[in-house]
Image (cartoon, helix red, strand yellow):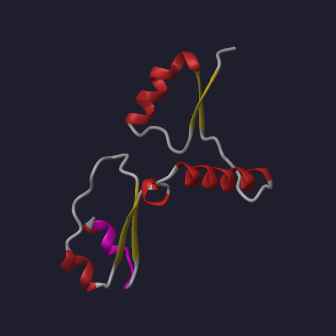
Amino acid sequence: MSGSLACLKVRGYIVAFGMASGEHEPLRFLQAARKSIYYTAVTTYSYIVQRDELLAASQEVFSHIENGTLRVRLYQTYPLSQVAQAHLDMESRKSTGSIVLVPDA
């Protein structure tokens, strides 16, 4: 985390979303205070607690996809027969973005 602080401007923001690579080095209060850094850690579960919230959020996302406001980019596809390789690539961070498994031809 200390490396991230070096590139931030005074009153910059650190937003942690997800922990794909595991937990990071802890952010020390004095490190953040020197530059008045804002820090937040976000999880989906903080915003979607009840099923009706999930349904409303999903409907909003899909409506943005339908009207073209939001475009979905698929970064990598694998045939279903290569699901093990897809998992290995994801675990080793060889892939970024979405991975989609498609039926074998």
Q: Position of residue 54 (x, y in %)?
A: 56, 51
The stretch in magenta equals 3-10
Q: Is residue 82 left or right of residue 102?
A: left
Q: Position of residue 8 (x, y in %)?
A: 38, 76
Give me the residue at 78% from left, 50% from top: 66
Give me the residue at 74% from left, 53% from top: 63
Q: Is residue 62 above or below residue 11?
A: above
Q: Is residue 43 above or below residue 4?
A: above
Q: Is residue 67 above or below residue 93?
A: below
Q: Position of residue 23 (x, y in %)?
A: 27, 52
Q: Nearer the viewer, residue 4 or 41?
A: 41
Q: Which quarter of the image is occupied by the N terminus? A: bottom left
Q: Nearer the viewer, residue 29 or 54?
A: 54
Q: Quadrant of residue 92?
A: top left
Q: Position of residue 36 (x, y in %)?
A: 32, 85
User: Is 8 within the magenta?
Assistant: yes
Q: Is residue 105 left or right of residue 76?
A: right
User: Is 58 within the magenta?
Assistant: no
Q: Is residue 100 above or below residue 97?
A: above
Give me the residue at 40% from left, 79% from top: 12
Q: Quadrant of residue 4?
A: bottom left
Q: Which quarter of the image is occupied by the C terminus? A: top right
Give me the residue at 41% from left, 75% from top: 13
Q: Is residue 24 left or right of residue 81?
A: left
